[in-house]
Image (cartoon, rainbow, N blue to C red):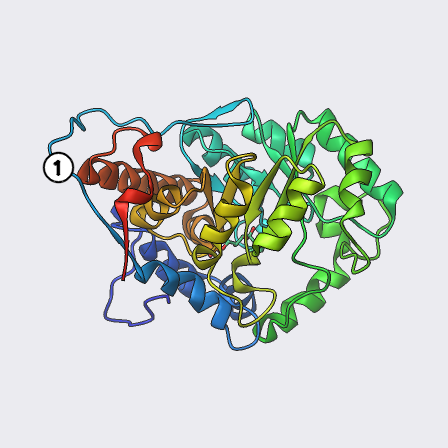
Amino acid sequence: MAQQDDKIPTITSPEYAKNIFDFETVASKKLAPDIWHWLSGGADDMKTLQANRSAFDHLQIRARRLVNVSKIDTTVKIFDQTLATPIVLAPVGSQKQFNIEGELATARAAASRNHLMIASTVSSFSLAKITTAAQKGVWFQLYPTPDRQITRTLLQRAEDAGCPVVVLTVDAPVLGNREKEAGFRRLLESEKDALGNFVDLEVQTTLDPSLEWDFISWLKENTKMKIVIKGIVTHEDAKLCLENSADGIIISNHGGRQEESNRGTMECLPEIVEAIKGRIPILIDGGFRRGTDIFKALALGAQAICIGRPYLWGLASFGQGGVEKVLDLLQAELVRIMQLAGTPYISNITPDFIARK
Ligand SMILES: Cc1cc2nc3c(=O)[nH]c(=O)nc-3n(C[C@H](O)[C@H](O)[C@H](O)COP(=O)(O)O)c2cc1C
């Protein structure tokens, strides 16, 4: 939770941040209450949101000694993309609500720090503008509208913009019950033209509750991009991803914003790793706030992790510079725990480095 205590000084520039929570404090004070609740809130009584964080507490690190850690390499390969770091920016819509430059500031920060960004269907700016700002390799997150012609147009635009991967979000057949943000949702509905990908498309909703597994074959017929499924939390669905020839998955519960009483995503990871057996890449998000959190997920079999709220705190606090500093801090924390645990390469981080409490 944000440190609301007035006795704790808020930072006045990104350079003063000790950790990413310093940005949470600034953002909580800077944003209007409805936007703050939209950013920070979860479904119902927020138990899934809390589970995402508490899941890390049951895992401890078994550090090894006397390993040469003078050089640390955090590169990972996903599909044919080599990523400088396994820390990925998760898709988040309507980022103008946090800073006037919205996704453009995020994309520039991701580019300057060499991180992969996933751009949301419901971004404030169009995908073309975001990919230009990011310079390369953005993945496109898809909310398929019930109108398949519009979905085809979105896919075509993503291909034209050079996106190698489409990320299909499957945990939002309807919106979760986020009581604190209700006021903001009304605002969005009355300002559809505030969504950059839809300025010239007549769309009633981006949610499609009729979607089933055969949609993946429809996607395969309609795009050349690799297909990654976001929102998987069980081994049953992980196996269905394989059966339906998905290229990758993101374990996610939408940051605790959809169904209540879900497990933390780190509790879902082992059964999904077991089901996937290394056949396709596994990414994971939900509650990643420290380098040690990232280390634990990599150890248990994820190839990369995504962050949502942390970079939004940076964006809301100081725009592009805030996002950059959030990325710098998490990357530095990851490098430090790799040095302390004796794992110079990401491939050295295995289940042997984890003990369960
Ligand atoms: C304000 C907000 C908006 C989001 N918008 C989207 C979206 O448009 N598409 C999507 O697939 N996920 C969306 N998400 C979920 C994130 O991609 C991600 O799963 C989640 O934020 C990860 O958890 P974390 O915030 O604890 O890091 C959103 C999350 C937040 C906080």
Badge 1 crowding class, 10 Å Cα cut-off, few under 14, some 14 to 19, many 20 or more, is: few
* Residue labelled with disc 1: 65
Residue 225 horizontal side relative to residue 118, left or right = right
Q: Position of residue 192 (x, y in %)?
A: 76, 55
Residue 322 position by quadrant = top left
**Along the line of sight, the residue nearer the viewer: 14 or 347:** 347
Q: Position of residue 10 (x, y in %)?
A: 29, 60
**Along the line of sight, the residue nearer the viewer: 77 or 20:** 77
**Along the line of sight, the residue nearer the viewer: 243 or 87:** 243
Badge 1 marks a residue whose secondary structure is loop
Q: Position of residue 34 (x, y in %)?
A: 56, 69
Residue 330 position by quadrant = top left
Q: How many marks?
A: 1
Relative vertical location of residue 71 with respect to residue 255 in this rendering, above or below: above
Q: Residue at x 67, y 38 (%)?
A: 246
Q: Residue at x 35, y 30 (%)?
A: 347
Q: Quadrant of ligand 1?
A: bottom right
Residue 299 position by quadrant = top left
